[in-house]
């Protein structure tokens, strides 16, 4: 069996696959492959281990004639054409649950950092702008305690964010989701609301939904206009769920108070993006799951999904319907 991966694998994982008789080809470059380059490397592969970022279209899948499984190193699968894969009989695996706590920690960090303009103050300290106590009077933060958190997409990551916010700051929890999350309602007193209610009643909105045609740019000018002027918008899911131009305008016009982003549109965020220099905006380079223990657990699941797919067995965590 042949496997292609678009990032270097940990030595232990590479060795294990080789010991199983699998021929592994790694792309060791730092940049993303172009679709043509990807096809050149992957066209003979029985399996692909895909680290986040690369877009896998129906065309790419069709040209990989031996492909049985694509094992994603992410919970999100918006970068791959699932319908085409299913029609071609290609199993798609992903890594839910094991990264929920780490990703919720990133959302919590962004909420708190934004509320205190922490990244901006850190930059001031670096630039020698810390002159005296009190020189921050023009750059005050806002409290989080007792405020209302609105969770957009209350699955496993949204639940962990709600739990942290409830336990640490006694926040009231609202959520907008297709299905009712009984666990969150029972344990955290979470209340399911319409999208408009979420917008108008939340002090912090934290996005944890998948990127789909329904959620694409749902946070746009019209949504920001319905939010509170002191609201903070946090997104650790996918940058495509917000419209970045509208977000910038909402911050400039003080329609909302601040934003914390672990995901942007495009990624990487260009360094001349003015959002990077706004005191009330915190930007992280898509590091939601970037914790040693979490990444190890993700890789374990990536390998389990890959091996099951190569054997034609049901994947432990399968995306295809
Ligand atoms: C995920 O697991 O979906 C992370 O956002 C990495 O893409």
Image (cartoon, helix red, strand yellow):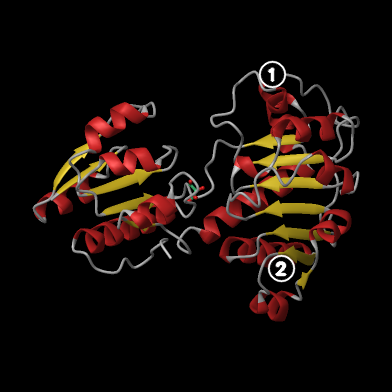
Q: Nearer the viewer, residue 200 or 118?
A: 200
Residue position marked by numbered label 2 in the rendering: 167
Find residue 244 and report its horizontal and vertical position in percent. Answer: 70, 33
Q: Residue at x 67, y 79 (%)?
A: 182
Pair 1/2: label in front:
2
Q: Residue at x 65, y 45 (%)?
A: 216
In the image, farthest residue toward the front: 87
Query: Do labels 1 and 2 touch, CB within 8 Å?
Result: no
Checking the image for residue 224, the label placed there is none
- Residue 196, quarter of the rendered image: bottom right
* In-image side of 139 versus 66 (left or right): right
Q: Nearer the viewer, residue 200 or 159?
A: 200
Within-10-Å neighbours for mark 2: few <14, some 14–19, many 20+? few
Tell me the quadrant of the picture where the C terminus can be found.
Answer: bottom left
Find residue 256 and report its horizontal and vertical position in percent. Answer: 85, 41
Mark 1 or mark 2: name the one nearer the start of the chain: 1
Residue position marked by numbered label 1 in the rendering: 127
Secondary structure type for disc 1: loop
- Residue 217, quarter of the rendered image: top right
Structural distance between the alpha carbons of marks 1 and 2: 36 Å
* In-image side of 73 versus 268 (left or right): left
Residue 262 makes an appearance in the image? no
Residue 128 makes an appearance in the image? yes
Within-10-Å neighbours for mark 1: few <14, some 14–19, many 20+? few
Q: Nearer the viewer, residue 170 or 154?
A: 154
* In-image side of 310 versus 103 (left or right): left
Secondary structure type for disc 2: helix
* In-image side of 247 versus 19 (left or right): right
120 is higher (above) or lower (below) than 194? above
Find residue 259 and report its horizontal and vertical position in percent. Answer: 74, 40
């Amino acid at each position: 069996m042949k496997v292609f991966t678009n990032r270097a694998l940990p030595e232990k994982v590479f060795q294990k696959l080789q010991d199983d008789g699998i021929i592994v080809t790694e792309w060791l470059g730092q940049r993303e492959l172009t679709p043509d380059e990807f096809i050149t490397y992957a066209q003979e592969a029985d399996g692909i281990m895909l680290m986040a970022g690369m877009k896998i279209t129906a065309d790419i899948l069709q040209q990989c004639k031996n492909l049985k499984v694509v094992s994603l190193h992410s919970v999100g699968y918006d970068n791959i054409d699932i319908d085409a894969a299913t029609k071609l009989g290609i199993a798609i695996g992903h890594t839910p649950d094991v990264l929920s706590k780490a990703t919720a920690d990133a959302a919590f960090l962004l909420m708190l950092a934004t509320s205190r303009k922490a990244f901006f103050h850190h930059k001031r300290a670096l630039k020698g702008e810390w002159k005296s106590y009190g020189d921050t009077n023009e750059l005050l933060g806002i409290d989080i305690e007792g405020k209302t958190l609105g969770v957009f997409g209350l699955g496993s990551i949204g639940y962990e964010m709600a739990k942290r916010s409830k336990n640490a700051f006694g926040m009231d929890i609202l959520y907008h989701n297709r299905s009712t999350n009984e666990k969150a309602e029972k344990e955290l007193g979470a209340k399911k609301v319409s999208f408009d209610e979420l917008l108008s009643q939340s002090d912090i909105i934290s996005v944890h939904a998948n990127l789909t045609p329904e959620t694409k740019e749902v946070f746009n000018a019209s949504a920001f206009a319905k939010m509170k002027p002191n609201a903070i918008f946090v997104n650790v899911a996918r940058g495509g769920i917000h419209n970045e131009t509208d977000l910038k305008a909402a911050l400039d016009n003080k329609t909302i108070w601040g934003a914390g982003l672990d995901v942007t549109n495009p990624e990487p965020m260009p360094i001349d993006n003015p959002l990077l220099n706004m005191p009330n905006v915190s930007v992280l380079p898509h590091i939601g799951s970037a914790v040693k223990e979490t990444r190890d657990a993700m890789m374990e699941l990536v390998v389990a999904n890959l091996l099951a797919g190569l054997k034609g067995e049901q994947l432990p965590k399968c995306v295809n319907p």
